[in-house]
Image (cartoon, rainbow, N blue to C red):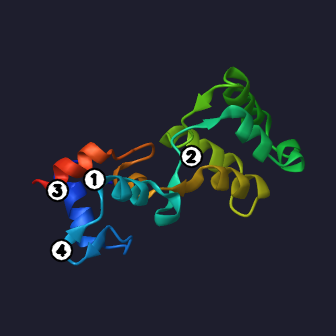
Amino acid sequence: MADFTLLALKNEIVNDSNSVGYKTSPTVWKADQAIVDLISDPTNGAQITRKQVIANEIVASIDLAEYAALTMPQRQYLDLLTQTAADEFIDANEATILNALTTIFGPGTASRASLLAKLQRQGSRAEVLWGEGKNVTAGEVGRAANL
């Protein structure tokens, strides 16, 4: 994922590699706000990885039978992770946490599939290019047009 710059924004609009439709003709850009609306619309993006999930979302992903089959150290780690921050965000994409969760719930388990699905959401084109939560403003579009 690249850093956001006005030049990167201009290149996205000019090249329109995903055919979002930022221009009214090959050389004429749509209005700044129209471009903001397009680049911010999740239907013009793709699946992105969420940076944070609430601990309760992790708990909700766990199959009870799979939890019952865990070893005591696995249960203790999972309990520590989810009880410490039950209503708080957890960086489930942090390598240590993600590795632990996908090790505890191995390939083919319902819990693993559910956990990995919860880490994904539909992101806007701006988020795909520059990271979760990135919003482009009409002012940035206007400044990018003048580069």
Q: Residue at x 34, y 50 (%)?
A: 130
Q: Is residue 48 above or below residue 15?
A: above
Q: Secondary structure at mark 3?
A: helix
Q: Is residue 56 above or below residue 124?
A: above
Do we see residue 3 in this rendering?
no
N-term mark: 1 or 2:
1
Please tell me which residue lies in front, 10 or 145: 145
The residue wearing badge 2 is 99
Tell me where residue 56 appears, x and y as whole percent: 74, 34
Query: How far is mark 4 from mark 2, CA to CA?
Result: 47 Å
> Given this view, does label 1 or label 4 mark the residue nearer the observer?
4
- Mark earlier in primary sequence (4, 2): 4
Label 4 environment density (alpha carbons within 10 Å; few <14, some 14–19, many ≥20): few
- Check disc 2 and report its element: helix, strand or loop: helix
Q: Is residue 15 visible?
A: yes
Q: Residues within 10 Å of mark 3 (few under 14, many from 20)?
A: some
Q: Which mark is residue 27?
A: 4
Q: Amino acid at mark 2?
A: Asn
Nearest-to-viewer mark from 1 and 3: 3
Specify the amino acid type for callout 4.
Thr
Q: CA distance from mark 2 to mark 3?
A: 43 Å
For label 1, the residue is 2
Q: Which mark is residue 145?
A: 3
Which quarter of the figure is the N terminus placed in? Answer: bottom left
The reply to whether dot 4 and dot 2 touch (C-beta < 8 Å) is no
N-term-proximal mark, 1 vs 3: 1
Kindly indicate the quadrant of the structure image that contains residue 54: top right
The picture places residue 137, in percent across and down from the top left corner, at 33, 44
